[in-house]
Image: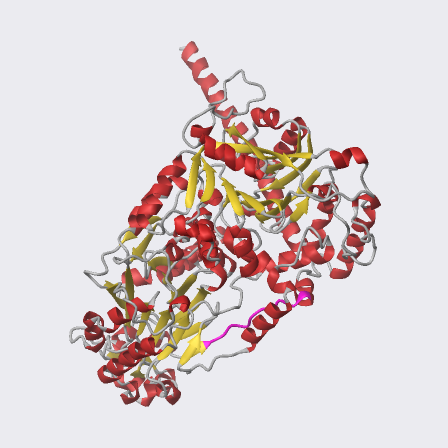
């Protein structure tokens, strides 16, 4: 009986949850009780210019630049409710994060994502289908221009605005004018007018209590009759009229989204009669809609909003809106405050000036590693080490906008409350104070800070003195830097920085695959370049530092065509092109410099399609692996693809490698049919300190070799081709307990990566590309003399590698809660596999006995 009661209770609660979730489908025109607009990014420092509108039932994303997926993930935004994306322009800056969001939405259970705006978005998503290594949400494009979009919350009109190029009559000096490189005479932006459906009335609980209306009545579906203007009869025969227990619902403002990338669009916006006639029009057949607007979001370059030309457009908007609808004429009960009508229109300006970082997890991670482990290989991020930047962020966080201000310049996570209409509000921001970040890292339920510091002291004392940089061996100052030392041969370049160490999709603490290699003071290359790599580079070095590195970026090597390994290539290439243009280099007169990319053959189709969809001009010089390198014969040992003797681009490729003093050898690996690993060989660059080296070493240049596995299961050819090497960077997506999942997805486990490193005779092994199930900390705490674990922003030279393995057993004390959580999940998974194995054995035995019994009966007959 107890079991039946439990089942009935579960059935009842489940039905209530289903009714709440699917209520909009049963009652499609009931306006939601809450509507909020939240800024995700303002376009500051290569970040996205995006915001989300949340009704509690559905979420609407406006623009989806690179990094949007990670911001949504960190703030635990309910992607399961993300059903619509409105794009203001077919620009890579606005759509580059769409595939990542589609992947996240699919994991959250969203089957269809409707995209409104540019019609070419559908073509873009079709091209990217084969990039994803898992199923994505279906992308459907709407025809919002011909037919306004409608749902229970909004009726949305879209107005295309085509460029009217200025012939030189700009009010701004030519050098100051911002002209995005993706604009053409046919470029179209989209203005969206969100008309909110007004709730008819609201139930007044005090009036209900006065008239004796039971709570079971006014909290039941019967109340809908009252809201629709119908009377109801109580059980005692009393008739309740709607006016007796309801009052007018609070007013909800309409709002407009305007994207004006240059001054050339202002005239077209001001003369768009379709827009202004819709603002004036009061629909007679839809009484729940009002004309006019009270809130505008402006997506503009810095300085444009305050310009005289743009202010004329703003004044025209204000005039038309106030003529068509006057909120102050509404009953006082429908306005939460008289201050709402002080300014006819509230303006939210997203112009890239919002300096507050949209992400916080990466600062916590880097600060902990920097303070407790090694200040050389775990540098502080730019925002934490720059006093000017810290002060700028602190000032921005301390400013609280007036809820009813006329103009507010957006910051990430800033909200505008539309229903109930409460105006602007800031969330409680988390400061970048180091002590706060360190204190919050420890949970007394797992490890206290005092307990952890005792373990860190043991860690530091366990490292041999000869492995520590001079002046850094101290039991009380973990990794405290001493005086700068002369660069020795062992300290020479290359310098390797991990910008992303996660697989598949980013999380709060790890971005997806990207490794930056500095060959010498003037040349950089990248190994893979997942979405958000540019944001990571900017977080580490600041906007100016990132631009300097981009100008010296000479090559990107792509291992395969999954989006988590190449999704950030075009963003980096475009940023590099813009950085070079800002320097006014002399060679720009002959054409825009391009970024060399070595990639599988499938990348050529993607690059061609990208050029057709986004008119940025040439930014990439593509080198296809099969066109440069011959197929590896089965009997060739080691199994490294040889460079072709001649052919298209072979001479250019050889010249590029010679200028970098670099050798690149592709190695076929079986992750996909077009997956590659790379072996790199070069000469160490750096001055020699004669105090630490002998004469022979000074006269003989030291060579280095590095093998990067990309994504691969266990591969004997990779071990043989890389033998021997100084450093193996190998993916370790799964723990050994998840070997079955690794086999299914053709990835490697920790044990596999270490075993390949031993077979390769690698001096050091660096594990990376960790599954999201391990989140912040991979499940490894065993000391092995040559095995280290990568974190985002890990930055090292070969001389740093011998001491990194000593940190591995102690990471769990810095991230105790995450470590215990991962261990519990791994143990539960292991027990589940044991139970499944035992159950399978029982089923097999039963099937065998049944088969034997049938055979015996057949023989006896």
Q: Is residue 354 left or right of residue 805?
A: left
Q: Is residue 426 magenta?
A: yes
33 relative to 376, above or below: below
Residue 493 found in image quarter? top right
Residue 22 found in image quarter? bottom left
For image coordinates 53% across by 15% down, the residue present is 635
Residue 710 visible here = no
> Which quarter of the rendering shows the C terminus?
top left
For the residue pair 750 and 518, the one nearer the viewer reads as: 518
Q: Is residue 397 magenta?
A: no
Q: Position of residue 626 (x, y in %)?
A: 44, 28
Highlighted magenta segment, given as a residue range: 425-434
For the residue pair 564 and 590, the one nearer the viewer reads as: 590
Q: Is residue 830 left or right of residue 763?
A: left
Q: Residue furthest left?
A: 284
For the residue pair 673 and 225, the one nearer the viewer reads as: 673
Q: Position of residue 630 (x, y in %)?
A: 47, 24
73 relative to 760, above or below: below
* Magenta-drawn stretch, dominant element (helix, strand or loop): loop
For the residue pair 380 and 223, the one nearer the viewer reads as: 380
């Amino acid at each position: 009986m107890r079991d039946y009661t439990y089942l009935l209770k579960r059935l009842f609660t489940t039905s209530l949850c289903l009714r709440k979730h699917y209520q909009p489908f049963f009652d499609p025109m009931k306006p939601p009780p809450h509507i909020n607009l939240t800024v995700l990014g303002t376009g500051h420092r290569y970040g996205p210019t995006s915001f989300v509108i949340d009704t509690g039932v559905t979420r609407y994303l406006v623009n989806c630049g690179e990094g949007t997926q990670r911001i949504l993930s960190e703030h635990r935004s309910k992607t399961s409710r993300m059903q619509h994306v409105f794009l203001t322009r077919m620009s890579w800056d606005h759509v580059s994060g769409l595939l990542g969001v589609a992947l996240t939405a699919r994991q959250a259970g969203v089957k269809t994502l409707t995209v409104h705006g540019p019609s070419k978005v559908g073509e873009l998503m079709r091209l990217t289908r084969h990039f994803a290594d898992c199923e994505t949400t279906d992308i459907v494009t709407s025809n919002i221009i011909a037919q306004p979009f409608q749902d229970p919350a909004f009726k949305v009109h879209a107005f295309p605005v085509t460029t009217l190029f200025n012939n030189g009559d700009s009010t701004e000096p030519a050098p100051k004018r911002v002209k995005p490189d993706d604009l053409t005479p046919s470029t179209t932006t989209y203005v969206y007018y969100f008309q909110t459906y007004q709730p008819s009335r609201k139930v007044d609980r005090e009036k209900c209590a006065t008239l004796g209306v039971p709570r079971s009545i006014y909290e039941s579906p019967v109340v809908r009759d009252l809201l629709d203007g119908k009377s109801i009869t109580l059980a005692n025969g009393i008739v309740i009229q709607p006016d007796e227990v309801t009052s007018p619902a609070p007013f909800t403002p309409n709002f407009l989204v305007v994207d004006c990338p240059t001054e050339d669009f202002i005239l077209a916006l001001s003369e768009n009669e379709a827009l202004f006639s819709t603002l004036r029009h009061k629909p007679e057949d839809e009484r729940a809609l009002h004309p006019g607007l009270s809130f505008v979001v402006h997506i503009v370059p810095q300085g444009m909003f305050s310009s005289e030309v743009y202010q004329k457009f703003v004044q025209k908007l204000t005039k038309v809106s106030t003529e068509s609808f006057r909120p102050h004429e509404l009953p006082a009960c429908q306005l939460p405050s008289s201050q709402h009508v002080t300014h006819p229109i509230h303006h939210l300006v997203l112009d890239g000036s919002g300096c507050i970082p949209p992400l916080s997890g990466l600062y916590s991670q880097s600060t902990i590693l920097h303070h407790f482990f090694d200040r050389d290989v775990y540098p502080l991020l730019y925002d934490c080490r720059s006093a000017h930047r810290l002060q700028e962020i602190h000032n921005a966080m301390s400013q609280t906008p007036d809820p009813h201000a006329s103009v507010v310049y957006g910051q990430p996570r800033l909200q505008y409350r539309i229903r109930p209409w409460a105006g602007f509000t800031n969330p409680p921001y988390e400061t970048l104070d180091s002590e706060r970040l360190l204190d919050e890292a420890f949970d007394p339920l797992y490890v206290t800070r005092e307990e952890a510091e005792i373990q860190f002291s043991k860690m530091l004392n366990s490292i041999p003195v000869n492995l520590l940089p001079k002046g850094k061996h101290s039991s009380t100052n973990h990794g405290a830097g001493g005086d700068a030392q002369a660069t020795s041969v062992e300290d020479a370049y290359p310098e390797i920085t991990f910008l992303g160490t996660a697989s598949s999709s980013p999380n709060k603490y790890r971005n997806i695959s990207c490794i930056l290699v500095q060959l010498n003071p003037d040349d950089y290359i990248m190994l893979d370049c997942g979405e958000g790599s540019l944001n990571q580079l900017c977080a580490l070095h600041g906007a100016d530092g990132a631009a300097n590195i981009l100008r010296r970026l000479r090559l990107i090597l792509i291992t395969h065509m999954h989006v988590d390994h190449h999704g950030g290539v075009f963003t980096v290439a475009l940023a590099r092109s813009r950085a070079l243009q800002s320097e006014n280099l002399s060679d720009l007169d002959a054409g825009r410099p391009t970024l060399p990319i070595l990639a599988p053959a499938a990348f050529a189709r993607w690059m061609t399609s990208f050029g057709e969809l986004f008119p940025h001009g040439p930014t990439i010089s593509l080198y296809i692996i099969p066109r440069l390198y011959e197929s590896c014969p089965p009997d060739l040992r080691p199994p490294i693809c040889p460079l072709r003797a001649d052919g298209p681009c072979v001479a250019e490729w050889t010249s590029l490698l010679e200028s970098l003093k670099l050798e690149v050898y592709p190695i076929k690996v079986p992750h996909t049919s077009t997956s590659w690993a790379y072996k790199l060989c070069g000469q160490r660059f750096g001055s020699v300190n004669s105090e630490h080296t002998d004469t022979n070493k000074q006269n003989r240049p030291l060579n280095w070799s590095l093998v990067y596995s990309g994504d691969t299961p266990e591969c004997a050819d990779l071990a043989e081709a890389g033998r021997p090497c100084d450093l193996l960077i190998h993916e370790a997506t799964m723990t050994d307990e998840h070997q079955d999942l690794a086999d299914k997805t053709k990835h490697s486990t920790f044990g596999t990566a270490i075993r390949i490193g031993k077979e390769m005779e690698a001096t050091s092994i660096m594990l990376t590309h960790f599954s999201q199930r391990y989140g912040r900390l991979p499940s490894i705490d065993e000391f092995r003399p040559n095995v280290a674990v990568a974190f985002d922003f890990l930055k090292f030279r070969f001389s740093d590698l011998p001491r990194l393995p000593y940190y591995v057993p102690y990471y769990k004390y810095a991230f105790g809660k995450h470590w215990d959580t991962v261990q519990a999940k791994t143990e539960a998974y292991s027990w589940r596999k044991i139970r499944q194995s035992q159950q399978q054995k029982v089923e097999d035995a039963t099937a065998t006995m049944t088969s034997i019994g049938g055979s015996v009966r057949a023989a006896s007959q």
